[in-house]
Amino acid sequence: MPAELTGSFLALDDGRPAVVLARAYARPPEGVWSLLFEPGWFPARAEFELRPGGTVRFSGDPNQPDSTGLVLAAEEPRRLAFEWGGDEIRLDVTEEDSGRTRLTLTDVLADAEAAARNAAGWEVCLTALDALARGESTDGPHAADAEALWRECYDGYVEAGFPSGAPVPGPGEG
């Protein structure tokens, strides 16, 4: 069964390109907020100084060198935004009427050609987050089976017309 693609590619009001993905969880906003800091779903280990202007340290991603970024917003339990690898990552947590909470991940891209690559990567990461939300263990976005899911999502996003052409890291380079 092909992977379900949940991302959108769009231009923000200021013209910057972005990919947006969303998930809904049967948890209150505080529960979704706490999931964001669980290891096993984000592609790197991230250590945050949770305040605007704070530092975020990234390590352990086999596809990127260790680095630091800037925390742009930290409004517990509603919004976390930070710089990572030239992109701006926004995680917005919104309570819905149904007793569910929506997580919206927006990756404001430094390069539009990264849209298909990054959307596929976030699909894999959010699949791992979904497993954590269900109380399941996950091997995370760098597990052996995650590469096949990434490739399927990437091909789907390219077919859907998302900009592509950015370098693809990892053993399945192409």
Image: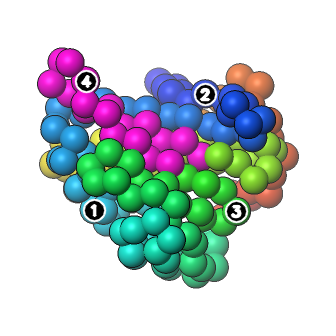
Q: Nearer the viewer, residue 102 or 173?
A: 102
Q: With 99 as the anchor, is 2 left or right in this view?
A: right
Which of the 4 image quadrants contains residue 170? bottom right
| CA gap, disc 3 and disc 4 | 31 Å
Main secondary structure found in the magenta portion: strand
Tell me the amino acid under the disc marked 1.
Answer: Glu
Q: Which residue is mark 1?
A: 38
Q: Which residue is mark 4?
A: 96
Helix, strand or loop at label 2? It is strand
| CA gap, disc 1 and disc 4 | 22 Å
Q: Which residue is mark 2?
A: 8
Question: In the rendered structure, are the residues bearing label 3 and label 4 in contact, judged by CB atoms less than 8 Å apart?
Answer: no
Would you call the spot at circle 1 few (<14 residues within 10 Å), some (14-19), or many (20 or more)?
A: some
Helix, strand or loop at label 4? It is loop
150 vs 142: above or below: above
Q: Is residue 138 magenta?
A: no
The numbered dot on residue 66 is: none
Would you call the spot at circle 3 few (<14 residues within 10 Å), some (14-19), or many (20 or more)?
A: few
| CA gap, disc 3 and disc 1 | 23 Å
The residue shown at (50%, 34%) is 21
Tell me the amino acid under the disc marked 4.
Answer: Glu
Q: Which residues are magenta?
A: 90-107
Instruction: Work out whether mark 3 precedes mark 1 in sequence or the reverse, and give the earlier one.
Output: 1
Tell me the amino acid under the disc marked 2.
Answer: Ser
23 vs 107: above or below: above
Residue 34 position in % (x across, y down)? 23, 56
Helix, strand or loop at label 1? It is loop
Residue 22 position in % (x across, y down)? 43, 32
Instruction: Work out whether mark 1 precedes mark 4 in sequence or the reverse, and give the earlier one.
Output: 1
The answer to whether residue 112 of the structure is visible from this angle is yes
